[in-house]
Amino acid sequence: MNQLAEDTLKTVKSTLGPLDIRKHSEHTRALLALSMVCLLWGTTWLISKKGVQYIPAIQLSGMRHFFGGGIYILYFLAKGHKWPTRKQFIQYTWMSVLMFVISNGFSVWSVQYLPSGLASVIGAISPIWIAIFSLVLFRDARLNLTALIGLVLGFGGIVIIFSDYLSDIFNSNFMIGIGFGLVASMTWALGTLYTVRHSRDNDPYYSLGWQMFISGVILNLISYMTGLHVPFAEVDHRAWFSIAYLVVIGSMITFAAFIYTLKRLPAAQASIYAYINPIVAVIIGSLLNHEKLNLLIALGTLVTLLGVYLVNSGFKKASTQMS
């Protein structure tokens, strides 16, 4: 009997051996981590969509960042990081307001009125806003032909998608959702630009934890003061599932995988997640939430992401030439 158990265990080990991530090269592990980022971040749009059915969007976003950021901070403090200085804390605060309170808060709010897949595509155009703001506000970029074509395709793809939602254009809630999504993508772009310029001396990952935690406190206070909140004891178990998923999968595991990827793969290769996440969100929204997905929406999504890719490529090329 013991021999049979040993033989069975050996068979199982030999069968599962190729799946043991420790036996693969560091480059392969980084690619697997990137695959996790591409897939898992794409699922958070639908999870947020489900969560806002049972809890206000501001509270959902606030609780996600409060718990996720708090766990990050505890981890880094346990690893020996010091408490932030007054100057750092001020930086973390305004960065959290711009990138998490406004941007993430509004993006979660947008899925209350929009299909999760459509909201993810609107969120994916942040690189286009980065190029526009760099050109108009900071004047440190040039609009070359590649970036110009990308801008046209990016916004053209959005137009293609919305052409299939013409019947919803005059729906006030639908328009509110579009507005929230656009504000979220714009503020994320502004936050990214200001972060690059003003936080070079900060550990980006420790800073991220503080930004999430501070935004969690602010968003929860806003939800409480505006009455857009549900008492903890009355939060539906399905809302708690969404919160747990967004904290554990959407923040802790995926951010850890993303950090692992950034340290081991070229930035251009690691950034591919930005183009795959919306595709995952659109497909999952259709399969699991019966959201509209047809040839026109698929084409518009691909055209938009191609535009984002060209803007990114042209923007980086122009920045290199200027430097």
Image (cartoon, helix red, strand yellow):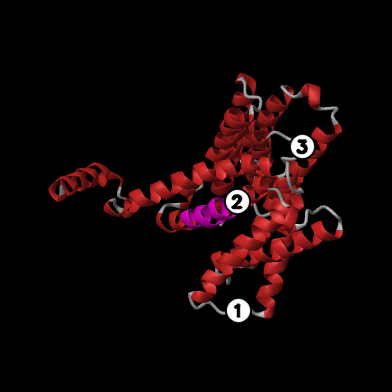
Q: Mark 1 sits on what residue?
A: 83
Three-letter residue code for mark 1:
Trp
Earlier in the chain: of badge 3 and badge 1, it is 1
User: How far is the residue under mark 3 from the one under mark 1?
Assistant: 39 Å
Comparing 291 with 279, the one in front is 291
Earlier in the chain: of badge 2 and badge 1, it is 1
- State the residue at coordinates (64%, 39%): 120
- State the residue at coordinates (50%, 75%): 78
Q: Is residue 11 left or right of residue 278?
A: left
Q: Is residue 14 visible?
A: yes
Q: Position of residue 182 (x, y in %)?
A: 74, 42
Of helix, strand and loop, which one carries label 2? helix
Earlier in the chain: of badge 3 and badge 2, it is 3
The stretch of residues the image draws in magenta is 247-258
Q: Mark 2 sits on what residue?
A: 246
Q: Position of residue 220 (x, y in %)?
A: 76, 60
Residue neighbourhood size for the residue with mark 2, other residues' Cα within 10 Å, grouped as few (<14), some (14–19), many (≥20): many
Three-letter residue code for mark 3:
Tyr
Q: Are marks 3 and 1 in contact (CB under 8 Å)?
A: no
Q: Looking at the image, which residue sits at the far top?
A: 295
Of helix, strand and loop, which one carries label 3? loop
User: How far is the residue under mark 2 from the one under mark 1?
Assistant: 26 Å
Labels 3, 2: front one: 2
